[in-house]
Image (cartoon, rainbow, N blue to C red):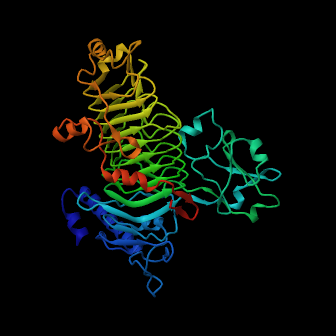
Amino acid sequence: MLLYFLMKSEPYKKNIAVMIHLFSTCLLLCFIFLSSGVTAEPDSGRVLYVNNITGNDIFDGLKPAPANDGKTGPFATIGKAFASVCTSDRIEISNTGKPYKGGNTLVAAGGTAEKPLVINGNGALISGLDLIPREKWATARNGIVATDFWPMSNMLKSYEPIQHWIGSPQIWWLDGKPAPNCTSEEQLNSTSGGFYWNKPVRQLWVHLPEGKTLDDVVIQVPVHSTAICINTDFVTVKSLRSMFSWNDGFDTHGRGKNIVFQHCIATDNCGQGFSVHDTNIALYEDCLAERNASSGSCDVNECHSVYRRCVFVNNTFEAGVYANENSQHTFENCLITGNQPFEQVWQRHSSRMNFINCIIAGNPRNPKGLVSLEHGTLYFRECTFADAAFVCQLSGMELGSLSIVRSIMTRCTEPFLAIPVAMTNRVKLVNNVYFAGAGVKFGDRIFGKPDWAEYQKLSGLDLDSRWEDPQLGGELNINMQSDSSVLAQHRKNSRMSIGAVLPDSVWELYRKTRGDVATPGGIIKAR
């Protein structure tokens, strides 16, 4: 009847084409639904369960514990859950105490503005550590075996003065124990059980223990990539910890929007702790990055990111936080401290970074500057800078702009700021407090407390700024004291607060991983 109706209607050819299109579409949809075993209406809003001890990837994932039918129960892997999830589902990952394998990327499904897809980790740990297959090893020379190894440690890979692994984080494991990190072939030759990243040839070399072969030992190194990578929209990732990733801890890629990470911890990874790419829009809340072999966060391309109440501490080979290309970022109530070997904040290309109520403190073991500006925008409001060689030194080659407003700069061994006269119109300094430092270098001259008024008149900068002891104390001797200082009283009595006061939750997060040791079996907490 449908064919007869279409043939009798005008225009005939157009209706025939419509009929063929509709008929073929119906056939295709029927084939998809019949072959996949699902109905035309998506089964959204389900809960999928993952348990790497009691689960099995042949199960349906719909129950937290296995049934007796051999079909019902949790999945064993996060990857299986990601492959099975539908729009606005929820994934519950059991914290079994046994690490899950990394390299999990969500590329489909996602959620909606009304109901995001939620991935709840319940504090579970994801590890990139694994065995390298026997066939991937070759003999380099007598007693030394080699395999390809080229981790995503961007800055370290291109840094010519260092041609080996830096030793932190500890990523080499032999028979479940930390193996020595050698910095040269000569040291490897004399170190039984030693590991050497031969960076020029992109290989890992291992000096097998005396009398041992590859069949006699268990070698574990970072093999799996990012713990969790989200490439879709409206997804919330909660309460997960990443370690030993060959790449980053937690990532986004693509054109996703409204991606949220909450209470996630990234430690001991070969890349960054957190990274946002492409045109994604991502929010990190109450997250921590420590001992990663790149920056705590590194966001690139044209992405937008917001970090709230986050901690970036003791990351080992880049900055604390790093923005590149045309990306845009806001940091609110964050602690950025102890990262090495470069500045705590890196702004590169035309990126824009805003810091509101943040503490940015140096690494006493390796005093450098705190902030590096290139050609973009850096804006600091109600921040505290401390314990470094300097806050920021501009050479005049930069094309960017620097604003520091209602902030504290203290305990620096060199002038807090170096400002070329030609950059005056691209520097904004308003209502700041300076203490315990050499002053500000404007042009070729350093102005300290005695000649501050002259500096203000010559430069037109810092007209509302002054020298005053902020009486910092508490954690890291950097908290604004609540009662005693003049600035604290000013904060209480005025909306025009100066310096940072971090929420207690940020300091609790900072203390959370102090002394932790990451091992193949999991995290050993400090006593």
Query: Residue at the location (49% across, 31% down)?
Result: 368
- Where's the N terminus, which quadrant? bottom left
- Residue 497's place in the image compared with 430, above or below, is below
**In this rendering, position of residue 428 left or right of residue 391:** left
- Residue 491's place in the image compared with 373, above or below, is below
Residue 285 in sight from this viewpoint: no
Query: Residue at the location (81% across, 53% down)?
Result: 143
Q: Residue furthest front?
A: 484
Q: Residue furthest bottom?
A: 68
- Residue 30's place in the image compared with 517, above or below, is below
Query: Residue at the location (22% across, 37% down)?
Result: 497
Of residues 15 and 207, the one drawn nearer to the viewer in this rendering: 207
Q: Hey, which quadrant is residue 417 in on the image?
A: top left
**In this rendering, position of residue 251 left or right of residue 470:** right
Q: Hey, which quadrant is residue 508 in on the image?
A: bottom left
Query: Residue at the location (49% across, 45% down)?
Result: 314
Number of labels in the image equals 0
Of residues 390 and 66, the one drawn nearer to the viewer in this rendering: 390
Of residues 392 and 218, the one drawn nearer to the viewer in this rendering: 392
Q: Position of residue 136 (x, y in %)?
A: 69, 56
**In this rendering, position of residue 429 left or right of residue 292:** left
Residue 20 in sight from this viewpoint: yes
Q: Position of residue 316 (x, y in %)?
A: 53, 43
Q: Position of residue 11 (x, y in %)?
A: 20, 56
Q: Position of residue 111 (x, y in %)?
A: 30, 60
